[in-house]
Image (tube, rainbow, N blue to C red):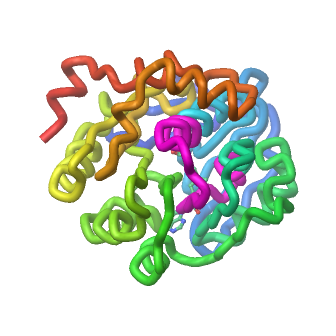
Amino acid sequence: MTDMTGWSVERLHADHAQALRADRVLYDSETAHQRLRVIENPTFGRILTLDGVVQTTEGDNFIYHEMMSHVPILAHGAARRVLIVGGGDGGMAKTVLTHAAVEHVTMVEIDAGVVDFSKEYLPMLSEGAFDDPRLELVIADGAAFMRETGGGYDVIIVDSTDPIGPGEVLFTDSFYGHARRALAPGGVLVTQNGVPFMQGDELTNTMRAFKALFSDWTCYLATIPTYAGGPMAFGWGTDGEARQVDLETLKKRFAAADIATDYYTPEVHLGAFALPPYVARLMP
Ligand code: SAM
């Protein structure tokens, strides 16, 4: 492949790149924090990139958002207060807010540019979530917020960029320590931890921190086509019993929540925690 004219090339890894055909560039600009682009691709629809790295696409975002929202919320069983760190496109907030039992969502995003722009160019991701009275949007660094928050969250979802640029602080031991303190008793922390086949160290580092902090820590997996290189890992940490939930209980909670999904099912939920040996070996 030599002529890449009309393609958007992501070089997240040292020796692997991903190219997505860009039929149109809808937006390309520098925010105060990062370079933001939106391209249009026939298979994935609109694609948001930050500093050249795919963040979310119209086509496959449901897998990521459903697995980071429904897994901790339904495992917890009584989540009322949810904190999202990052998540500027609004897709995570929308998915969390499909749970009628969730009373309050705080979303802490560092870059107001991503939020404003997503409302205009990617409204299909947030679908009005920014207007939901249960959502409180805070424009701030998630690490600084976590240090200072009074806490009491049943579920914390770290919907961050990769550990480069502004997202780096969201992968530190001190951030995870503050996140643990911000959880209500029985609360669950989930984090995006990249694709272990390509970014194994990232997962190992987070898991090492979780091991020191939580009585129950692991990761679970889901395959998202535009996060290339195999399944993505989500960190899971809690001092509660949420991972012990059985299939029948999950099925009851899922039915009671009455939410439509395209990836999540209670069976997928439990299966996602089964780790193939190459991922299990990355656990400290
Ligand atoms: N799903 C994507 C992925 O894994 O590639 C990430 C989603 S994107 C919504 C991540 C968001 O995290 C961006 O909007 C970015 O501005 C935000 N972010 C990065 N660093 C942050 C920080 N320190 N505090 C709060 N938000 C941050």
Q: Quadrant of residue 251?
A: top right
Residue sticking out furthest to the bottom: 148
Residue 194 lies in magenta, yes or no? no
Could you tell me residue 142's position as x and y percent?
A: 49, 71
Q: Is residue 123 left or right of residue 171?
A: right
Q: 180 and 144: which one is in front? A: 180
Quadrant where the image shows the C terminus: top left
Q: Is residue 38 above or below residue 16?
A: below
Magenta segment boundaries in residue numbering:
68-93
Q: Is residue 15 visible?
A: no
Could you tell me residue 195's position as x and y percent?
A: 38, 34
Q: 147 and 89: which one is in front? A: 147
Q: Residue at x 50, y 54 (%)?
A: 155
Q: Is residue 179 left or right of residue 110?
A: left
**Quadrant of the rendered image holding ligand 1:** bottom right
Residue 87 lies in magenta, yes or no? yes
Q: Is residue 237 visible?
A: yes
Q: Is residue 138 left or right of residue 222?
A: right
Q: Residue at x 21, y 56 (%)?
A: 209
Q: Is residue 277 above or below residue 77?
A: above
Q: Quadrant of residue 182?
A: bottom left
**Count of marks placed on residues:** 0
Q: Residue at x 39, y 53 (%)?
A: 186
Q: Residue at x 82, y 65 (%)?
A: 133
Could you tell me residue 121's position as x and y percent?
A: 84, 51
Q: Is residue 93 above or below residue 86?
A: above
Could you tell me residue 94's position as x and y percent?
A: 73, 48
